[in-house]
Image (cartoon, rainbow, N blue to C red):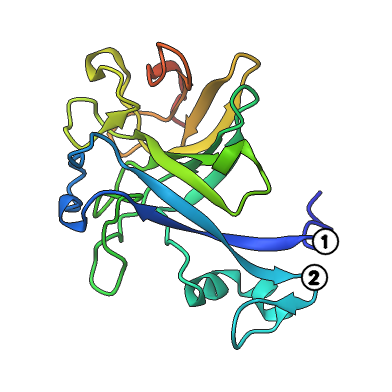
Amino acid sequence: HNLTLLDEGTLYVAKLTGDSPVNEIDGAGKLPNDGEFDGSGVWIPLATGTTSHVPGMTAEEVYVYTRLAGDKVGATKMDRPEDVEPSPRTGRVYVALTNNSDRGKEGKPGADEANPRNANKHGQILELAENWDDPTSDGFAWRLFLVAGDPDDPATYFAGFPKSSVSPISCPDNVAFDAHGNLWISTDGNALGSHDGLFGVATHGDRRGELKQFLTVPTG
């Protein structure tokens, strides 16, 4: 259970910075000139026990109003994060970002390298690698492992795997790993007009990014 989750340790929030020039991120999902959406990030402390690290907020306020605390310290606003899982093979961490149709609207954050599409209907999966493979590090490298949608859409990406050999996917919602390090993805609210499903994809080796649909969920 999560009852004692925040009793000890430090609560952090992530700030992601892209490594491409801002003018190469146009909100349409076009890959920047270096061929992938990637960059670096830092973990910003919010609170440790009863001590707040956020100016103007008590620790209790940080724990209750965590999103607002994140805003105060400049955390990156992501496209509906739904699930986080570490790979048992590589130690890299994967985050399912389901969608965000408000991205780029008036008064809302615009596209950035970690969230490269305005009016994002299909979502993406973020891959994090802690600096020096140390889970206690306060920094990490990141890249978008998968930018979901129809593979025929130029605004999709499957870890560099040929898109003619992958399945369409929309709205990744939950993720889990098998013993071989394959990532299994379930969807929620398929924006391609088809049913939700379960998908498998290798995260390392020659078949990294080869997404295949395993089953389709019936309607009703």
Badge 2 element: loop
Give the residue at x 45% y 70%. Answer: 74
Q: How many marks?
A: 2
Report x, y in % for residue 95.
Answer: 51, 42
Badge 1 element: loop
Residue 188 appears in the rendering: no
Mark 1: which amino acid? Glu
125 and 19: which one is in front? 19
**Location of residue 50 (image quadrant):** bottom right
User: Is 73 on the left or on the right of 54, as rendered?
Assistant: left
| Residue designated by label 1 | 8
Q: Residues within 10 Å of mark 2 (few under 14, many from 20)?
A: some
Report x, y in % for residue 30.
Answer: 17, 41
Q: Which mark is residue 82?
A: none
Give the residue at x 25% y 33%. Answer: 156
Going by the picture, which residue comes out furthest to the bottom? 56
Going by the picture, which residue comes out furthest to the front? 132
Would you say the residues marked 1 and 2 are in contact, meaning their CB atoms lie under 8 Å apart? yes
67 and 24: which one is in front? 24
> Mark 1 or 2 closer to N-term?
1
Q: CA distance from mark 1 to mark 2?
A: 6 Å
Residue 108 appears in the rendering: yes
User: Is 23 on the left or on the right of 8, as rendered?
Assistant: left
Up the image or down, 54 lies above or below 92; here it is below
| Residue designated by label 2 | 49
Up the image or down, 54 lies above or below 204; here it is below
Mark 2: which amino acid? Gly
Report x, y in % for residue 12.
Answer: 62, 61
